[in-house]
Image (cartoon, helix red, strand yellow):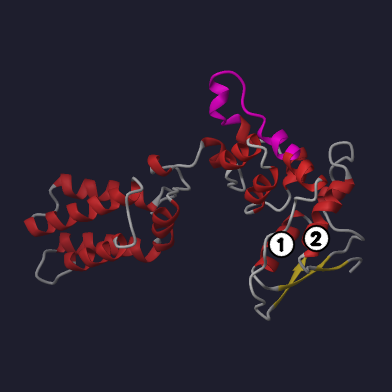
Amino acid sequence: MTDMCPVSNTIIKLNEIVKSGQLKIPKSRRIAEEILELLNDISWGRAGDEHIPAIRSLSHELKDKDLDESSVETGNLVSSVLTDHLESLNSHIGTHNCPTGDCVKLAPAPCQMACPAGIDIPTYVSLIGLGRDAEAIDVIRKDNPFPWVCGLVCTRPCEFMCVRGRIDTPISIKTLKAFASERALSDRRYKNPPKEPDKNKKVCIIGAGPGGLTAAYYLVLKGYGVTVIETLPMAGGMMMVGIPRFRLPREIIDREVAMIEELGVEFRFNT
């Protein structure tokens, strides 16, 4: 497989096999066409939980010893997709979302595809427009625990892909993020999500920079005990020492780091 969506890529390959006449046996062509129909359902967001088992069953039929080599190879192709990309197929069905954008009906908005964190930008922008700032922050923090920081220093690749820009100017996605973060935190509506039950397992993270803090945030939410070791006397890493204060006030970093610490993350500085 290439970097293409496995669903889209398999549809292309199966179409080529069927149209080229490689499958000489009518039964094999019928099975391949049934698999194509099921894959197209997944690609168009029409699939349910029964689709994967049905595709698996049909792929086994193609590998029947009474069929020819082309049939078996086609069955192996489909089986390998189910083995190597099962999570992606289930994600297409469960979330109606194609991360690569190859399945056009399931493609995220261009702004979301451009976001390095994959944040659901259309949803949080809509929530901000409705005055539901705290809910917007909850959406952002599913993928990024630093909405206020990013609202100030993000390079906003999302705005360069904003469809509104084709009409006049892009939506100010970055500024809206900072606006909602400031309002929610100032009004004490910026709250941590609930943690999963304690797993009785501990994790040590080296470095309290953006990467380490992000890992700590999501691990502690999963129920792990997290300790972060940092050589500097404070958390933040390059956010603290690499970005000028006029662009990123230190108190904003401190407030978002404090949210992570409130979840139970332990910090050991000067270590």
| 227 relative to 118 in the view: left or right | right
Q: Indicate the position of residue 169 as horizontal and vertical percent values.
A: 62, 21
Left or right side of 34 for 180: right
Task: Say which of marks 2 and 1 sits in front.
Answer: 1
For label 1, the SS is helix
Say whether residue 115 is visible: yes
Q: Where is residue 171, by image quadrant?
A: top right
Q: Position of residue 99 (x, y in %)?
A: 48, 48
Q: Amino acid at mark 1?
A: Tyr
The residue drawn where x is 42% and y is 49% is 96
Which span of residues is magenta-colored?
A: 160-179
Q: Earlier in the sequence, mark 2 or mark 1?
A: 2
| 47 on left or right of 168 | left
Q: At label 2, which amino acid type do we have? A: Ala
Find residue 230 and report its horizontal and vertical position in percent: 85, 64
**Residue at image location 70% in from the left, 35% down from the top:** 176
Give me the disc on residue 208: 2
Q: Which residue is mark 1?
A: 217
Is residue 173 in the magenta section? yes
